[in-house]
Image (cartoon, rainbow, N blue to C red):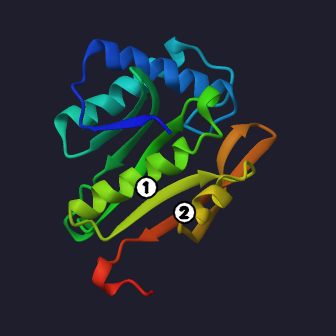
Amino acid sequence: MDLRFVLDPDLTLELHDQLVDLWVAVTNAGGAVGFVAPVTAADVRPVAESTLAEVAEGPDRLLVGYEDDRLVAVLVVADNRFHLKTHWRVLKRVMVHPDTQGRGYGAALMREAERVARSSGVEALHVTVRDGLGLDRFYRRLGYREIGRLPAALRLSPTDSRDEILMWLDLPEPSRRSI
């Protein structure tokens, strides 16, 4: 696996464009990242710009993965912006380019997010998943557990509503881990 991670990269115009292109490719391949296919760059760009603005303004963090110089993986480690929730973070916009799937990049991206969170003193990670795609199995293999569901919370079309699955990963200190 030849994946290089960068935490909090410079938010250049080139990175903005690469993120939009990745988001379009993931969505149009059936990925569950806030849109329903088909989408164009014009559809995605406002949400991508808003996401990157939240990173630029802080305290959200951007984790990107490159295969050589090509952006192929991304996620946002989002702060809860509430003083009683400072001990955990939400992972948003988890994406791996469709033509690189099957290489372990998704698992590597999630492990890197876990490493970053632990090194920042974060005690748990939360991610939401669109039901019906099998994504919950991917997260379960990584140690996440389902902690709840919002029934029919996602309306993909007038005739297609999906549950939103809430998943959680505790990040115990290494000394507290069971062997």
Residue appearing at x 66%, y 24% in the figure: 28
Residue appearing at x 52%, y 26% in the figure: 23
- Secondary structure of the residue carrying tag 2 is loop
Which quadrant would the C terminus be assigned to in this image? bottom left
Relative to 113, say whether 176 is above or below.
below
Front in this rendered view, residue 168 or 73: 73
Residue 80, visible in the rendered structure: no
CA separation, marks 2 and 1?
8 Å
Q: Residue 176 appears in which quarter of the rendering?
A: bottom left
Front in this rendered view, residue 38 or 116: 116
Q: Label 2 neighbourhood size at 10 Å, few (<14), some (14-19), many (20+)?
A: few
Q: Which residue is mark 2?
A: 142
Residue 172 in the image: x percent, y percent? Answer: 34, 77
Residue appearing at x 43%, y 55% in the figure: 111
Front in this rendered view, residue 34 or 177: 177
Q: Which residue is mark 1?
A: 111
Tell me whether circle 2 and circle 1 mark residues in contact (CB < 8 Å): yes
How many tags in the picture? 2
Residue 149 in the image: x percent, y percent? Answer: 62, 65
Front in this rendered view, residue 175 or 25: 175
